[in-house]
Image: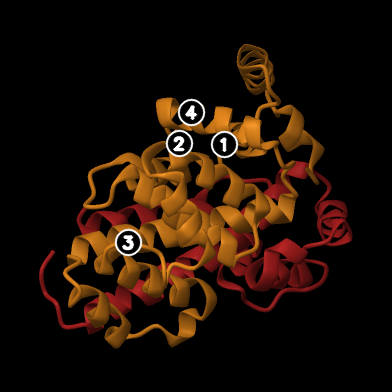
Chain colours: A red, B orange
Amino acid sequence: MKPSEHRELADALRARVTEAKGKTDSTLRTAAMNRAALAEPFGALVAQIDEAAARVTDDQVAAVREALGSDKAAFEIVMAAAIGAGLRRFDRAMRAIEESGDATE
Amino acid sequence: MRLNEVERGDTLRARALIGAISLASGMRLPDAARVAFYHKDFVSAALGAWTQKTMRGESAWSVGQRELMAALVAKWNACAFCIGAHRAVAVEGLSRETVDAVLADFETAAIDEGFRATLRFLHVMTTRPNDLGGEDARRVLSSGVSRAALADAVAVGTLFAIVTRYADALKFTIPSEAEFAKAARMLLERGYQ
């Protein structure tokens, strides 16, 4: 695929996190995706997913589930945090390709 | 699975699909598929479309090589579910010896230098993304890998940075090796959408 096609698909995914009609407030989801400052219990779960998701605990997920009141809302925060970690890597890697000086598609 | 509704399905259609596929395949439907069926109004379509094009679309990398990249990203992220799932798909396209040698140490495995250079790039991207720069990309491109092929690998690295994180955050149930093999054949037949 052309790098530009991957960029379009990445942007579409980013837009879904922010613009989808979800159960959570778009501001909260977007902050989870961008790892912006978040109140607890959201901050701890988002940081853990970003840094070492294999060490996420039952209590961290349960606390977010409890604060938001539904599985669907907690799911949105988990997905937003995971997608943010991936897209930060995507942006960095695509910038590295641009900085390589290779101008071909 | 830490969220019950993801495990059992949130709509009649999802519950019916989970039941029917589990029955037909003779195994518990893996949690990765349950996530794909869940909360369809949110990100699943966008994630599925990008994953399908990246893992099965046109690319200089074979399906087996892309699946092996996914398994390696899973290893670097310590995601047991994704290592098992994508190793099982990789061995359908590459030899078991090659797959296991790459997973053990891609620096010494018998693979071509372009693939090795790309795996080095993915390793930095996965474990130390802030260190990634133009010099890392230049090294891959000078090994004969095209810019498009490197971007394809970056997409694999991105998608499995995402998948491994939600698999572990939600605590996916780990299938047996025989179930992983069966699920791998389903994934090759049906794809990611």
Q: Pick the residue in front: B49 or B55.
A: B55
The CA span between labels 4 and 2 is 12 Å
Q: Earlier in the sequence, mark 3 or mark 4?
A: 3
Identified by mark 4, the residue type is Arg
The CA span between labels 3 and 2 is 27 Å
> Residue A91 location, x and y as percent?
39, 72
> Residue A76 location, x and y as percent?
65, 51
Residue denoted by label 4: B185
Residue denoted by label 2: B192
Few, some or many C-alpha atoms within 10 Å of disc 2 (few <14, some 14-19, many ≥20)? many
CB atoms at circles 4 and 1 under 8 Å apart? Answer: no
> Residue B172 location, x and y as percent?
72, 45
Label 2: state its secondary structure.
loop
Camera-near label (3 vs 1) is: 3
Q: Earlier in the sequence, mark 1 or mark 2?
A: 1
Identified by mark 3, the residue type is Ile
The residue positioned 61% from the left and 69% from the top of the image is A31
